[in-house]
């Protein structure tokens, strides 16, 4: 269960997130759509303080943080309750695929090495990359790197998995395999918050779609309502453009 | 012009080689201490610890801004007049301390630049999985910075090996001191110092080969 109240982020004079309120139920799969520069990525990044919000509160699972006076400890707790998949994969360049997944388990969660290694190998098998366990990121294709990136986020077992445009940096040939893996994650009723421009994919897996514009959530509803019966004029215009 | 006394030179080689271990000891000890000190200062310069930052800036400025020989004299001959307990420090220890302080200032800047050269996404990924700042530095950022800084740091190590010859001026009999003593007896200064020069040169060349091995090792994660 995730509860966000009044989440506000400014870059200089620009308000990128304008007092966002959002509730997400456990197991809900929420997709965020909208024109670029409307705060979709910033929303995700603020939820684990990669960007620091100025105001508002964030509650994820047992962790509750008041943005205005978040301590280092609060921020770590929030980050450990979430996992993040980056647009540019952001695999640790000095670690193999297996080590990328083990890192959070051993160093952050304090799991025994052997247990973490087994978990990493299991996750790699699920992502179809068992034979790439000992490969470094530089030796993997974009699609493979992003699958490891998703595996790294899966292994953590976080309350909330966030995906920041996970296919936007990929060559078209790799998009399918990454979306397939995300579908499999979604099937387990993992709570997911996904920023994407893949409308067909959003329609398939989302319980809810949020349309963001100008740092606000303008429309919020099930895919059929948002995509087939949009009410807001800006959403209608956006859908016409991406169609 | 007279001919080189090659027999004398060949005879001198084993004598001077006998002092190579001392030279390497001073250089390696100085390098290890300097690496530790430089890494700490570099991390401080990146994350800027309040109250400590100005001290590190001052330290780096002083040790880059004054000659190594002046620093060595200041420590070995000067400071004991001010602090009595320093009179017990021998020339080798003083040389190692001087080399450490001097080179750590340069290396701190090289490592700082390398740290800022590590891609921002690497920092964010480490943060996103909930690493503390210390874990992120130790596990992700510094190992990648090491690869970027390696060629520069090897250069400083070479400089440091050559810098150990200044220990001679603190009364340490190392390669240079030994050659000086030999030549004082034989008057064959050119031969004696030429042997020293050649041995330094060979040592540095061997190190350059070692650098290639090191770089291959550090680049193994980046091979396509």
Image (cartoon, coloured by chain):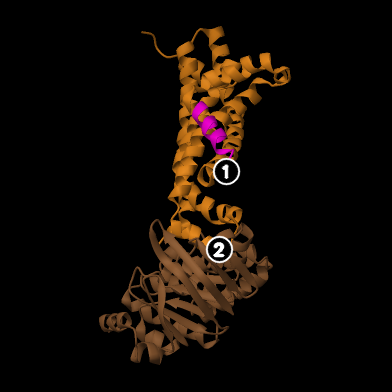
Chain colours: A brown, B orange
Pick the residue in front: A191 or B102: A191
Q: Which chain does the residue under circle 1 lie in?
A: B
Q: Is residue B176 left or right of residue B201?
A: right
Instruction: Residue under label 2, please give it.
Output: A67
Residue A172 versus residue A188: which sits nearer the camera? Answer: A188
Mark 2: few/some/many CA within 10 Å (<14, 14-19, 20+): many
Tag 2, which chain? Answer: A
Q: Is residue B125 visible?
A: yes
Distance from label 1 to label 2 (Cα)?
A: 23 Å
Task: Give yes or no for contact between labels 1 and 2 (Cβ–Cβ under 8 Å).
Answer: no
Whether residue B52 appears in magenta in the rendering, the answer is yes
Task: Indicate the quadrant where residue A9 lies.
Answer: bottom left
Q: Say which quarter of the image contains residue B40.
A: top right
* Secondary structure beneath label 1: loop
Residue numbers of the magenta segment: B50-62
> Residue at image x 61%, y 36%?
B33
Q: Residue at x 37, y 78 (%)?
A: A175
Closer to the camera: disc 1 or disc 2? 2
Q: Residues within 10 Å of mark 1 (few under 14, many from 20)?
A: few
Specify whether residue A165 is in view: no
Q: Position of residue B81 (x, y in %)?
A: 67, 13
Circle 1 sits on which residue?
Answer: B49
**Regarding mark 2 in the picture, which secondary structure is present there?**
helix
The numbered disc on residue B98 is none
Q: Nearer the viewer, residue B159 or A195?
A: A195
Main secondary structure type of the part rendered in magenta = helix
């Amino acid at each position: 269960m995730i509860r966000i109240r009044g989440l506000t982020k400014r870059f200089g004079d620009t308000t990128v997130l304008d007092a966002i309120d959002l509730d997400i139920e456990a197991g809900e799969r929420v997709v965020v759509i909208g024109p670029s520069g409307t705060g979709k990525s910033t929303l995700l990044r603020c939820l684990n303080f990669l960007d620091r919000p100025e105001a508002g509160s964030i509650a994820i699972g047992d962790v509750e943080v008041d943005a205005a006076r978040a301590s280092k400890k609060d921020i770590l707790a929030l980050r450990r309750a979430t996992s993040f998949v980056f647009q540019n994969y952001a695999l640790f360049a000095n670690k193999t695929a297996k080590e990328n997944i083990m890192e959070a388990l051993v160093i952050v969660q304090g799991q025994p090495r052997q247990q973490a290694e087994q978990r990493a190998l299991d996750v790699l098998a699920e992502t179809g990359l068992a034979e790439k366990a000992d490969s470094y990121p530089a030796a993997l294709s974009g699609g493979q790197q992003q699958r490891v990136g998703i595996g790294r986020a899966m292994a953590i077992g976080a309350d909330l998995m966030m995906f920041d445009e996970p296919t936007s940096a990929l060559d078209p040939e790799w998009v399918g395999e990454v979306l397939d893996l995300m579908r499999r994650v979604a099937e387990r009723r993992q709570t997911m918050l996904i920023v994407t421009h893949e409308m067909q994919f959003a329609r398939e897996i989302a319980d809810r779609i949020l349309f963001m514009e100008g740092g606000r959530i303008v429309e919020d509803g099930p895919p059929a309502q948002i995509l087939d019966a949009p009410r807001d004029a800006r959403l209608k215009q956006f859908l016409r453009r991406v169609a | 012009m007279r001919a080189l006394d090659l027999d004398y030179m060949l005879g001198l080689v084993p004598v001077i080689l006998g002092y190579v271990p001392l030279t390497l000891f001073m250089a390696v000890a100085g390098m290890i201490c300097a690496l530790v000190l430089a890494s700490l200062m570099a991390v401080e310069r990146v994350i800027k610890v309040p109250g400590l930052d100005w001290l590190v800036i001052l330290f780096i400025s002083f040790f880059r801004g004054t000659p190594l020989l002046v620093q060595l004299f200041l420590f070995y001959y000067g400071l004991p007049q001010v602090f009595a307990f320093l009179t017990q420090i021998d020339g080798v220890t003083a040389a190692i301390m001087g080399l450490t302080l001097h080179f750590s200032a340069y290396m701190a800047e090289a490592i700082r630049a390398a740290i800022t050269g590590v891609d921002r996404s690497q920092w964010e990924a480490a943060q996103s999985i909930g690493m503390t700042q210390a874990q992120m530095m130790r596990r992700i950022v510094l190992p990648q910075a090491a690869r970027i800084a390696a060629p520069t740091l090897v250069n400083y190590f070479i400089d440091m090996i050559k810098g150990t010859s200044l220990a001679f001026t603190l009364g340490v009999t190392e390669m240079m001191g030994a050659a000086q003593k030999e030549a004082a007896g034989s008057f064959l200064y050119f031969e004696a110092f030429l042997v020293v020069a050649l041995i330094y040169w060979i040592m540095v060349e061997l190190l350059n080969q070692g650098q290639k091995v090191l770089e291959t090792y550090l680049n193994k994660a980046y091979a396509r």
